[in-house]
Image (cartoon, helix red, strand yellow):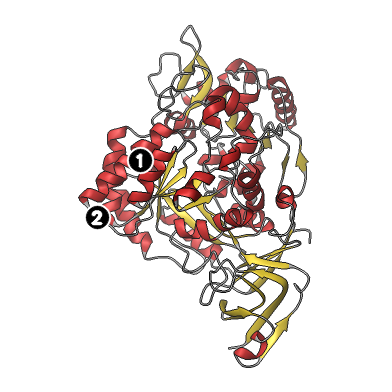
Amino acid sequence: MPVSVFQAKRIITLNGYRPFATHVAVRDGRILGMGDETMLTAFGRASLDDRFAGKVLMPGFVEGHAHVFEGMVWDDRYVGFFDRRGPDGRVWPGLTSIDAVVEVLAAEAAALTDPTRALSAWGFDPIYFDGRRMTRCDLDRVSTTRPVLVLHASAHILNVNSAALDLVGLRDDTDLDGLARDEAGRLTGELLGPEAMGWVRSKIDRVPVLRAADERVLRRFADIARASGVTTCTDLLNQLGAEAVEVLTTVTGADDFPIRLAPALAQRMHSLDDGVARWKVLAGASTDRLKFGLVKLVVDGSIQGFTARLRWPGYHNGAPNGMWYMAPADVMQVVDAYHAAGAHLQIHTNGDQASELAIDAIEAALIRTPRADHRHTLQHAQMLDEALLRRMKTLGICCNIFANHIYYWGDAHAAQTVGPVRAERLDPCGTALRLGVPFSMHSDAPITPVAPLFTAWCAVNRLTASGALLGAEERIPVEAALRAVTLGVAYTMKLDHLVGSIDVGKYADFAVLDDDPLAVDPMALKDVGVHATVVGGRVFPAPGS
């Protein structure tokens, strides 16, 4: 088979024995070797591809916590606090008050011709509005007849208007977890957590996080990912029924699909026995572009939504503790069953109380069923302290840290949720690195944009949106941050034998950068441009390049 050799100004391999190169040889979509120009003759006659001679190559970025509904939400109106760039390049300005959100949505509603069509929006983030929560009365100003649905930035909370409440049969006397109420006991229209949000889906299929992904959505998601240099990406919550798997297999199997996708089986969408059985079926169905094996559990909610479970002293502003999305006894049972079956668990734990419960559950499962190299991973894991991290190291538990929170919510965390002291150790990449706990970092798109270099920038600099330095001792070096968004993620996904570094036998997956991320000022790391990606030796130019 023919050999191609890609030439670059510099190649950052992230392998231990040859960290830098200028040429990488590729055959059959895999890496034959890396070094200097001798790669042209080392494996017989080879063709030189010098289109990247002035660029820098890295391993393709690996996004270990994202959701394909990033490709779906852009069908609806963005109403977040921060400016956000859409897949078409348009920048949607942030909305800085509830009145501004209502005004935008009222205009959207007026433009709809179908009087029964629900209006949905996403990205709403009330933590910046001085404690003011959106209510049904606010959204009734948008429409009193049309259902209006507003998904929070965390994707853990949904606001609806009175028409939506009436349509789905939620009343003041409804007994259901997650229904926010005012002082008189009346529903405010704020629905917290999967049970209450799922109730809406029974009647209104317009909530992005609850809709099924088709080929159009998957391709949009893949294009968003590759624009930031991602070549392997998770979809970290998917029912993975027969129809969904068929769509995933068909779409990812196309030669022009630009990423590898690793969907995680959503534990909460199956009974325990059915879920374990489904995981066993999927475990043997992986392809080069579609990697099964992950199982997702969600233990608590979000810190900024005040639905995460915190240990003493709780929320800094006195808010009540958050929600158990799984009863603690169920967490113990579910972790034990999937662990015994051989599954690879990805466990959402934002608050430290939730993280502690997950660690307890994994420890109990390991005592019952010893397993080497399980690599169960705590996702987000934002409030881990040193004691919890030391336990994780002993037990072989990894963490995938939500470093982007430092920028987007760091100011709010210091002022409202966890206070100025605990905020300094949020997203503790520095401590994880120092203690030798395997860790990676992620975007949780669409919660924050897919942008691994920005995520790395957050961990390196730990600056909030206001420019404050939050937790100087938790900063990590640039090389460690780059490793965390490539090989570190691949390790937590048990794919480090295939992706995450440039090494012999691995997939020829590269991110092609305009500048050297190891040479630029660390403050400029987020501004390094992505010129293209390479997946299995095939070049995919970045959109607009």
Residue highlighted by disc 1: 358
Q: Quadrant of the N terminus?
A: bottom right
Give the structural element (helix, strand or loop) at label 1: helix
Q: How many marks?
A: 2
Circle on res. 90: none
The quarter of the displayed image where residue 519 is located: bottom right
- Asked if one can make out residue 480 in the rendered structure from this viewpoint, the answer is yes
**Location of residue 114 (image quadrant):** top right
Q: Nearer the viewer, residue 426 or 336?
A: 426
The location of residue 349, given as percent across then percent down, is: 43, 38
Task: Please provide percent x and percent y for residue 536.
Answer: 59, 72
Amino acid type, residue under disc 2 in the picture:
Pro
Q: Amino acid at mark 1?
A: Ala
Q: Which mark, by number, is residue 370?
A: 2
Q: x, y percentage for residue 328?
A: 31, 33
* Mark 1 → mark 2, Cα distance in angstroms: 17 Å
Neighbour tally class for label 1: few under 14, some 14-19, many 20 plus, Cα within 10 Å: many
Q: As drawn, which residue projects farthest toward the bottom?
A: 44
Q: Earlier in the sequence, mark 1 or mark 2?
A: 1
Q: Which of 258/120 is in front?
A: 258
Mark yes or no: residue 325 visible.
no
